[in-house]
Amino acid sequence: MSVSRPNNLDAYWMPYSDNKYFKSNPRMLARAEGMHYYTPEGKEILDGTAGLWCCNAGHGRVEIKEAIQKQAAILDYAPTFQLGHPIAFEAAARIAEMTPEGMDKVFFTNSGSESADTALKIALAYHKARGESSRVRLIGRERGYHGVGFGGMSVGGIGGNRKQFGALLPYVDHLPHTHGLPENVFARGQPEHGAHLADALENLVALHGAETIAAVMVEPVAGSTGVLVPPKGYLERLRAICDKYGILLIFDEVITGFGRIGTNFGAERLGVTPDIMTMAKGLTNAAVPMGAVAVKNSVYDAVVDAAPSGIELFHGYTYSGHPLAAAAAIATMELHRAEDLPGRARAIEPYWQEAAHSLRSLPNVIDIRDCGLIAGIELAPRPGKPTQRALDIFRRCFDEGVLIRVTGDIVALSPPLIVEKPHVDRLIGTLAEAIRAEAA
């Protein structure tokens, strides 16, 4: 056994990280407030990613901290299997006030990954309750990201997340992604072309039979794969095909929820209501881990009413509706309402869009995509060294006091919704200098 010592980096196996590189070249964050992180040495780091798409109200919000502290003094934990505590019901009711009309039932999880797997299980339970047990096939999309559970990973379509783990769930298929149409390069907001790509679902119905397909899961705006914005009419067509064949449509709103694209949820901004919706991240402003799944009332009624007396859905987590997380969620949703964070995002969106697209003329920038307060800047990879250019830009930006996120050779930006124009200028200006510096 190694001797414990302060700041020993050896024990922690870091997620989604180059552990060997980091532990030789650590970049550490020690505290956060407002729009900024601070290193242990006190250096200010402008947060251009809202943590990991999750701190939409900014960092260190006193209202959330005090709600957690107050709740911890009253009730630190209570089980929610055959028992309840009031604050979990209040949190669910607050979420139901924000979701699209008719989506009033909320199931609590602890993360986006758990929300994805929960949504898929609910879809299967729904069809079984309706006497359609043959509907077991789950349809995802290439380049989709639905967390790291085996369900979400199977339906997800990012190769690097799948290849290391061998066999995944059976009865899964994928739609093509919407990226790469040359006429959509440098589109602002939703691209004009590509709605026809949703028709690939008709092909899967013809291949497998509608009677075997339970659900289709997509992100309204695909975030983690590099900001893929749905073409105009694409989600509408997907909704229509699902309705035609009795297939449930699931929106993964873990990133697009809670104001990220200027409305409470992406479904509202994009004008399409799913049957099931996952959420996490911005739900508690990341102060305490929490996720949730909202479903149409008809989905809940089908599962609950069809079940015999007793447990209707054999699913749940020890920490579902955790009191501290519920307190954080209520305080966060109150901040969203009081400060109209979705409205703030809409107000600054034109300035954000213009700033992001100002990078178009820089070396190696081959595409820029945006929706709400999200932007993706796609870079030409270095010959024989894919991902290295973006990674070097990430490191250079951090050293210059700005946090960005990279996925492959794409820079993804998603600042807290409290961002102001000087923050945008600094974020985009620092990124521009880093892109120039890594032009070779």
Image: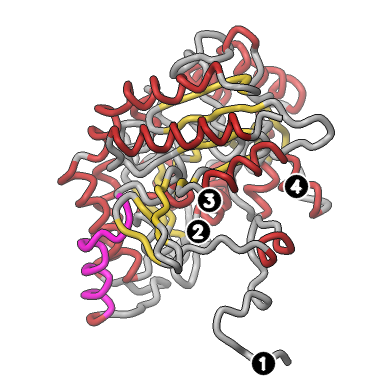
Nearer to us of marks 1 and 2 is 1
The answer to which image quadrant residue 158 occupies is: top right
Q: Are marks 3 and 2 in contact (CB under 8 Å)?
A: no
Name the residue beneath numbered marker 2: 313
Nearer to us of marks 3 and 1 is 3
| 365 lies left or right of 28 | right
Task: Pick whichever of labels 1 and 2 is earlier in the sequence.
Answer: 1
| 364 lies left or right of 350 | right
For the residue pair 279 and 31, the one nearer the viewer reads as: 31
For the residue pair 2 and 142, the one nearer the viewer reads as: 2
Q: Residue at x 45, y 52 (%)?
A: 51
- Indicate the position of residue 4 as horizontal and vertical percent values: 62, 89
The answer to whether residue 301 of the structure is visible from this angle is yes
Name the residue beneath numbered marker 4: 162
Q: Give residue 398's mark.
A: none
Q: Secondary structure at mark 4?
A: helix
How far apart, in angstroms, are the residues tagged by discs 1 and 4?
36 Å
Name the residue beneath numbered marker 1: 3
How far apart, in angstroms, are the residues tagged by discs 3 and 2?
49 Å
Q: Residue at x 45, y 20 (%)?
A: 358
